[in-house]
Amino acid sequence: MRAILLGPPGAGKGTQAETIVKEFSIPHISTGDIFRQNIKQGTVLGKKAKEYMDQGLLVPDELTVELVKDRLLQDDCRNGFLLDGFPRTILQADALEDALKSMKQKLDFVVNIEVRKELLVERAVGRRVCSGCGQTYHMTFNKPKKEGICDNCGGELIQRKDDTEETVTKRINVYQEQTEPLIDYYTKKGIVINIDGEKPISEVGKDIVAKMRNK
Ligand code: ADP
Ligand code: ADP
Ligand code: ZN
């Protein structure tokens, strides 16, 4: 299974990725997670990426494309992968297509999670992530058992620096301008699965798996 998750910030891509990768036993490749890890480790890439991420802007394609191409060549991607947060521009999508072609592979699905703009800000601003294991929670919609503490590892839950109302609003606009055109791009290829992302988390997950299994 080779698939992409598409959807605006806060749509539930990371949350649903967990279900999908378990179901199909494929690696979860989140460019946002890779950038955040680089920031944490203080790498050169992390320093560059941070300037853009803090402003709610996309990290330049030159820094993003090579990273993903290298990742897709790793052994665990041989039988498939789930890309989360990549591609985000037409240039990235073209680069992905070329890379897959040279690996004699092709995409099976683009899972497009649809959520109205009005709901996205509340989702992203209420998001909390574990500083230990990266697990995602929501203050209202997906609470941990103990406030502020990760169910999995006991780590402290923190708010992402770019999850303020102002930056989230900016990211949603960037999504509409630069990433939304990809829905058309992939619809023309006949591989888009549209998902109602406004239902509760577990129902969205069931819908996605059912549609991915049905083809
Ligand atoms: P994305 O990766 O698309 O930015 P996340 O998966 O991190 O989105 O979800 C954003 C926030 O919304 C998280 O706090 C998550 O717990 C919550 N969330 C995800 N899916 C739903 C849903 N179907 N209903 C309510 N809240 C959700
Ligand atoms: P969300 O889905 O909530 O927007 P992500 O974790 O996917 O969050 O991305 C966080 C930030 O990382 C983005 O706002 C952007 O700055 C950067 N980023 C992630 N993936 C890409 C990408 N494919 N191209 C450019 N920038 C990216
Ligand atoms: Zn944790």
Image (tube, grey):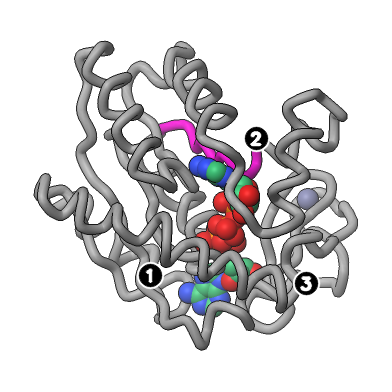
Q: Which residue is under mark 3?
A: 145
User: Who comes first in sequence, dot 2 or dot 1?
Assistant: 2
Q: Is residue 28 magenta?
A: yes
Q: Secondary structure at mark 1?
A: helix
Q: Which residue is under mark 1?
A: 204
Q: Is residue 157 magenta?
A: no
Mark 2 nearby-residue class (10 Å; few <14, some 14–19, many ≥20): some
Q: Are marks 2 and 1 in contact (CB under 8 Å)?
A: no
* Whether the residue under disc 3 has CB within 8 Å of ligand 3: no
- Camera-near label (3 vs 1) is 1
Q: Which residue is under mark 2?
A: 34
Mark 3 nearby-residue class (10 Å; few <14, some 14–19, many ≥20): few
Rendering coords of residue 48 (x, y %): 75, 34
Give the Cα separation between the discs numbered 2 and 3: 27 Å
**Residue shown at 80% from the left, 36% from the top:** 39
Part of the protein shown in magenta: 26-34
**Residue shown at 43% from the left, 13% from the top:** 73
